């Protein structure tokens, strides 16, 4: 995070007040990652409007969007044990804390989400010849929902969870006209990064759901949706990412129209004949 802020400061022409805000972000990342705009303003001895302008000069719509990025960057720099320590508290009920945390993530998502970015992901799936969805470990969960529900609507969307030669073989079957959807939260596996690099080299369009706008995958992605992901234990929360997938599916149902509805009806008829439910 310090390098990111230093690069911005090195460009100059920010104004002294804005520079004071950036110095707070650089020197006190933990504080900045959960502080309100007013608290940062007080710390930097500027007004709240200056904090908002500083966020916008960094490419964000405002302080809430920048704070999501700061928090994700800060947590990504910690190990699982350090993340757990960050959230520790003897007086905290983890069950209630988890619900409150996810409610806050959804509130932040609603304030910072750019709906057109979600629509562009849905449009890319709708127009793709086929879609390959990648995720690692628990972070494959949004891909499970996306591939299953989109498949029911008649879209060729397939989840791939394994690595090694199986992943290479899956990538070998993709090319121009196809889409790769990737969920990148917290730590980025080397295999996932290399898969995206290979896909980009083969002219495969890439859509990315991530909790960090500085993810190494962002420059290769045509579509990027940023989500908050902080949990209350040692692992990130998938609630906001799942909400985005839900929104993508809703948009796919809209643009798919009668064709998507017919596919769902055919699937339900097959379920009935197979006595699945």
Image (cartoon, grey):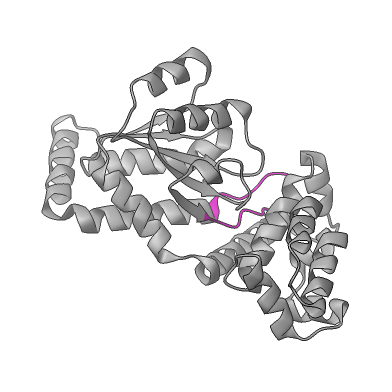
Question: In this picture, is 177 found above or below 64?
Answer: above
Q: Nearer the viewer, residue 113 or 80?
A: 113
Q: Look at 15% across and 43% down and name the residue there.
A: 263
Q: Look at 68% across and 44% down and name the residue there.
A: 235
x and y percentages locating residue 106 in the rendered image: 54, 64
On the image, which quarter does residue 82 sit in? top right
Q: Look at 50% across and 32% down and name the residue there.
A: 196
* Image quadrant in which the C terminus is located: top left
x and y percentages locating residue 202 in the rendered image: 40, 28
Question: In this picture, is 126 found above or below 251?
Answer: above
x and y percentages locating residue 47 in the rendered image: 77, 86
Q: Which residues are magenta?
A: 226-239
x and y percentages locating residue 194 in the rendered image: 55, 27
From the image, give the main secondary structure of the stretch colored magenta: loop
Q: Nearer the viewer, residue 179 or 102?
A: 179
Q: Is residue 91 visible?
A: no
7 horizontally vs 238: left or right: right
On the image, which quarter does residue 230 sit in? bottom right
Q: Nearer the viewer, residue 220 or 120?
A: 220
Q: Is residue 59 visible?
A: yes
Q: As drawn, which residue projects farthest toward the top?
A: 165
172 horizontally vs 150: left or right: right
8 horizontally vs 183: left or right: right
Q: Look at 62% across and 72% down and name the residue there.
A: 56
């Amino acid at each position: 995070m310090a390098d990111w802020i230093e690069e911005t400061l090195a460009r100059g022409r920010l104004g002294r007040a804005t520079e004071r805000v950036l110095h707070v972000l650089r020197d006190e990342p933990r504080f900045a990652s959960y502080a309100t705009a007013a608290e940062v303003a007080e710390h930097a001895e500027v007004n709240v409007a200056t904090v908002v302008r500083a966020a916008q000069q960094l490419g964000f719509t405002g302080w809430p969007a920048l704070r999501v990025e700061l928090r994700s960057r800060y947590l990504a720099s910690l190990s699982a044990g350090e993340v757990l320590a960050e959230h520790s508290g003897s007086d905290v009920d983890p069950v209630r804390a988890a619900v409150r945390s996810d409610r806050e993530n959804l509130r932040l998502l609603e304030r910072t989400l750019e709906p057109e970015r979600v629509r562009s992901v849905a449009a890319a799936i709708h127009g793709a010849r086929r879609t390959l969805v990648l995720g690692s470990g628990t972070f494959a969960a949004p891909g499970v929902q996306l591939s299953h529900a989109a498949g029911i609507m008649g879209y060729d969307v397939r989840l791939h969870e394994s690595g090694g030669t199986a992943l290479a073989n899956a990538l070998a079957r993709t090319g121009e006209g196809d889409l790769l959807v990737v969920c990148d939260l917290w730590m980025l596996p080397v295999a996932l990064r290399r898969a995206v690099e290979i896909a980009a080299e083969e002219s495969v369009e890439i859509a990315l759901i991530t909790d960090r706008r500085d993810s190494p995958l962002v420059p290769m992605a045509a579509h990027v949706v940023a989500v908050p992901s902080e949990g209350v234990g040692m692992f990130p929360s998938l609630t906001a990412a799942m909400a985005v997938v839900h929104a993508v599916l809703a948009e796919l149902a809209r643009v798919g129209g009668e064709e998507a509805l017919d596919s769902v009806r055919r699937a339900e008829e097959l379920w009935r004949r197979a006595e699945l439910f």
